[in-house]
Amino acid sequence: MDVLKELEEFRKKDIPYTRVLSSMCTLPHPIAVEAHKMFLNTNLGDPGIFRGTFELEKKLIKMIGEMLHNDIASGYICSGGTEANIQGIRAARNFMKKKNPNIVVPKTAHFSFEKIGDILRVEVRRAKVDEEYKVEVAEVENLVDDSTVAIVGIAGTTELGQIDPIVELSKLAEEKGIWMHVDAAFGGLVIPFMDDPYPFDFVNKGVKSITIDPHKMGMATIPAGGIIFRDQSYLKTLEVETPYLTSKTQYTLTGTRPGTGVASAYAVLKSLGYEGMKKVVKTCLKNTRALVDEMKALNFEPVIEPVMNVVAFKTEKADKIKEELYKREWVISTIRNPRAIRFVIMPHVSEETIKSFIEVFRKVLVEV
């Protein structure tokens, strides 16, 4: 068998995005695909060789920084939200220089913070959330002590798309002299394009670092995560010497680093601009509302009214529903607290996709 045909057979086994209502990734924009092809053999781990790609990354970071209300932001494009969160907390730990460091995160924080605790040897303290699944600021304050190096807020929680009270958390971080990290891996490219955007970013003086992933709502090719710092001084806390490369130091977590994510992310944001991204977000929010209406008609209530294009519906049969849908090659996810089925309405999820899903969903309900 020809190797390409063999690969094609394996690829056919993958479930197409048109049947995936659980992922925070999506089909890349066509211009992202073209940009990706142009930068296939680039390695930003050696920026002195790939000078143009490195220059493009700086331009992209400036573009993202300005979107986050900071024209002197610094950072880089990485593998995704997990790496970005690791680097944000690693920078906080290095900057704060405290013995037995700990960080305070919401209970709703992404599982990457469990990896952070293990890798960086920082204690992870999880604060309670209120009835709307936002972290309780008073609880965060109670967990902070002299060894706390960072407070974390989420702008678009993985399970519900909720936004923590970043403004209040930032003020607390300022008062305590502690680093504030915002995990906006998903919401970072949704919130700025909403009609009434919540101020989650560098407009808050306490915020020192932000995770934001272009390969999610930015429709860049995978991998294209991002870690953005308030200025270069914070990024420099991550530097190590690299004597055998064309650069003297390196601040990234991985050594070899493709330029494809940089090129594809830049291509999408540059070509669509603010109005184009706003249109994409508006469509996703409209389709989210359409799904909510369909589900309510079937007597499913959302855990919270959707803040963005993520929504979950309460049901004790969540696991069984997910299992039966998967047998039919429809992918949703579940959450545990409360028991619910979860949906992410990405750009690949059209009105037609939702209608097709509901038809199958009705049949599944009869069986479960």
Image: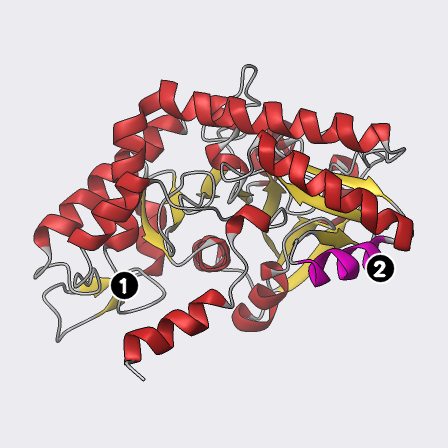
Which residue corresponds to the image point at 45% horizontal and 21% vertical from the top-left?
279
Which image quarter is the C terminus in? bottom right
Instruction: Give the quadrant of the N terminus.
Output: bottom left
Residue on which disc 1 sits = 257
Q: Which residue is mark 2?
A: 320
The residue type indicated by label 1 comes to: Arg
Find numbered disc 1 in the image and state the secondary structure of the residue it sits on. Answer: loop
Amino acid type, label 2 = Lys
**Residue 11 position in % (x across, y down):** 43, 67
Q: Residues within 10 Å of mark 1 (few under 14, many from 20)?
A: some
Residue nearer the viewer, 209 or 50 = 50
Q: Residue at x 32, y 61 (%)?
A: 252
Q: Main secondary structure of the magenta part?
A: helix
- What range is drawn magenta here? 318-328
Pick whichever of labels 2 and 1 is earlier in the sequence. Answer: 1
Using the numbered discs, state the Cα–Cα distance from disc 2 to disc 1 in whole angstroms: 40 Å
**Position of 277 compared to 199: left or right?**
left
The furthest residue to the top: 195
- Residue 108 placement, left or right of 155: right
Direction from residue 97 to residue 108 in the image, left or right:
right
Q: Is residue 324 magenta?
A: yes
